[in-house]
Image: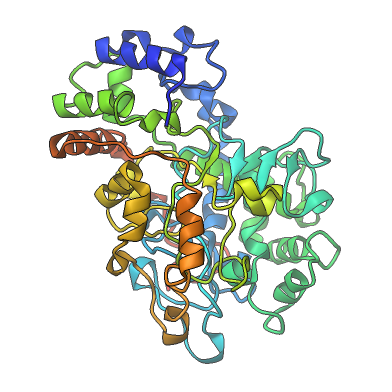
């Protein structure tokens, strides 16, 4: 990876001290090559959405009313008790039971049909304005030329009125049979989703709005949160998605880490080892070539020879590959490229990688330092998956296919970087310094009950 000139200049400023790492000093840095202090203005609603909208979103996020079979919520795969992820390499959605690493694959006819093909990404800081690309393959992006304001999988069916891309993202998990909708024949929402009917009068989003209109507690919350809602008939799923985004923006903002405090001038906020690790991050280790900017991401797409596990996305000869960004752009050059994740709270958000292939942060860092060798020597025992024989049989098909393995390895954009053992430890110290202490205990996010009356916990 190569650092751009601005990254190097700002990295030097960090080594010298935090004073130069200020918003006013890099207004001309269009690609956010280096870090600067994060403030309220970096977030939607300047970091202060309407509290009534936030409270509505909090209830919706944890309520199984938004799933086809009333058995899974947004929080199931993005829970406060599992650091806004689920702790699994690959999630198991509709039909499974339990939370986090204890989640199973369900039973009998209600059992899950497949694992979700990609790792459940954490939600920290996605309410920041600079996040204009969502999902591992970037299939949802801000696009002012689109009627909805977003290039998205639903095309022109995505309705207008969404506050931001985080709200647009909340429109889609409810449409997935594997994630929340269920299988055709199980419920009317699943049937609509299977037919691709998202926005029609009997489509997924209309049916969900109908459910919410029937619950007095939700009617009161919607009326309190929105000036354009006078009664139940005014409620739409767009209102629900906007509220969910407001909740995520406030609750999972994470910008008070030791690193942030160091940038704001608190010289003792980071340990000497973490500061040394920061120098490596922005220097010799080359991490900032992709993990640049205030949230340590360039929002771009890269192939780093990440092991592919699980059912895949239907790509390739076997149908079990995941071509990543190529699925969106149609460009073969984008095959196996995935979005650079933010590194805020990265120590909390394992397993790591778009497939959840790595079970420790150190293993993930070691992979970045020597991706191809790491890929070929991958330790399969580190995956964290809910087990069932038929699904287990699919997990490593691609790693056992020499042609696919060679293709993944040869697509890698990264070059090896040699660090001494002590330098690796310093780099890990810096990554731990990106953890906001306020994110360590998120129990207060969870409502004890929700207006639907459905259980909050399985």
Expressed as whole percent of the image width and height from the top left, the position of residue 111 reads: 52, 84
The relative height of residue 56 versus residue 319 in the rendered view (above or below) is above
- Residue 354 visible in the shown view: no
* Residue 379: quadrant of the picture: bottom left
Expressed as whole percent of the image width and height from the top left, the position of residue 344 reads: 38, 37
Expressed as whole percent of the image width and height from the top left, the position of residue 197 reads: 81, 66
Looking at the image, what colour scheme do you see? rainbow
Q: Is residue 318 toward the left or the right of residue 122 in the image? A: right
Query: Residue drawn 37% across and 66% down?
Result: 100
Q: Is residue 428 toward the left or the right of residue 386 in the image? A: left
The relative height of residue 161 versus residue 456 in the rendered view (above or below) is above
Expressed as whole percent of the image width and height from the top left, the position of residue 139 reads: 66, 49
Count of marks overlaid on the render: 0
The quadrant of the picture occupied by the N terminus is top left
Q: Is residue 190 toward the left or the right of residue 349 in the image? A: right
Q: Is residue 252 toward the left or the right of residue 27 in the image? A: left
Query: Residue drawn 54% across and 52% down?
Result: 336
Query: Residue drawn 35% across and 59% down?
Result: 376
Query: Residue drawn 51% across and 49% down?
Result: 411
- Residue 48 visible in the shown view: yes
In this view, the residue in front, 281 or 146, is 281
In this view, the residue in front, 303 or 219, is 303
The quadrant of the picture occupied by the C terminus is bottom left
In this view, the residue in front, 456 or 220, is 456
**Residue occupying the far right of the picture:** 201
**Residue occupying the far bottom of the picture:** 108
């Amino acid at each position: 990876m190569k650092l751009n000139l601005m990254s190097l200049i700002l990295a030097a400023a960090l080594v010298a001290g935090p004073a130069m790492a200020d918003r006013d000093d890099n207004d001309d840095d269009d690609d956010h090559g280096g870090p600067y202090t994060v403030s309220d203005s970096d977030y939607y609603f300047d970091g202060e959405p309407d509290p009534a909208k936030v409270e509505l979103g909090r209830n919706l996020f944890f309520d199984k009313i938004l799933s086809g079979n009333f058995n899974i919520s947004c929080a199931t795969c993005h829970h406060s008790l599992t650091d806004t992820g689920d702790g699994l390499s690959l999630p198991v959605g509709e039909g499974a039971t339990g939370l986090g690493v204890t989640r199973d694959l369900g039973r009998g006819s209600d059992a899950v049909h497949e694992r979700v093909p990609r790792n459940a990404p954490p939600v920290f800081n996605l309410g920041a304005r600079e996040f204009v690309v969502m999902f591992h393959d970037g299939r949802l992006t801000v696009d002012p030329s689109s009627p909805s304001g977003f290039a998205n999988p639903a095309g022109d069916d995505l309705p207008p009125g969404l506050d931001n891309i985080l709200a647009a993202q909340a429109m889609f998990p409810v449409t997935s049979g594997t994630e929340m909708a269920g299988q055709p024949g199980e419920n009317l929402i699943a049937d609509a989703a299977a037919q691709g009917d998202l926005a029609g009068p009997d489509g997924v989003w209309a049916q969900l709005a109908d459910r919410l209109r029937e619950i007095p507690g939700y009617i009161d919350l919607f009326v309190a949160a929105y000036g354009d809602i006078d009664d139940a008939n005014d409620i739409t799923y767009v209102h629900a998605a906007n509220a969910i985004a407001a909740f995520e923006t406030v609750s999972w903002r994470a910008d008070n880490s030791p690193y942030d405090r160091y940038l704001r001038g608190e010289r003792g906020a980071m340990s000497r080892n973490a500061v040394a690790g920061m120098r490596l991050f922005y220097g010799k280790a080359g991490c900032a070539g992709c993990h640049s900017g205030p949230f340590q991401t360039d929002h771009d797409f890269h192939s780093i020879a990440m092991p592919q596990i699980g059912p895949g996305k239907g790509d390739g000869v076997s149908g079990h590959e995941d071509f990543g960004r190529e699925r969106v752009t149609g460009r073969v050059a984008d095959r196996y490229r995935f979005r650079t994740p933010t590194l805020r709270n990265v120590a909390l958000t394992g397993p790591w990688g778009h497939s959840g292939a790595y079970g420790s942060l150190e293993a993930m860092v070691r992979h970045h330092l020597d991706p191809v060798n790491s890929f070929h020597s991958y330790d399969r025992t580190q995956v964290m998956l809910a087990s069932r024989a038929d699904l287990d049989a699919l997990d490593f098909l691609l790693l056992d296919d020499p042609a696919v393995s060679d293709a993944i390895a040869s697509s890698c954009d990264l070059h090896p970087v040699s660090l001494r053992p002590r330098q690796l430890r310093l780099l890990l110290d810096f990554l731990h310094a990106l953890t906001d202490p306020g994110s360590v205990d998120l129990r207060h996010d969870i409502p004890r009950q929700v207006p639907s009356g459905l259980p909050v916990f399985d």
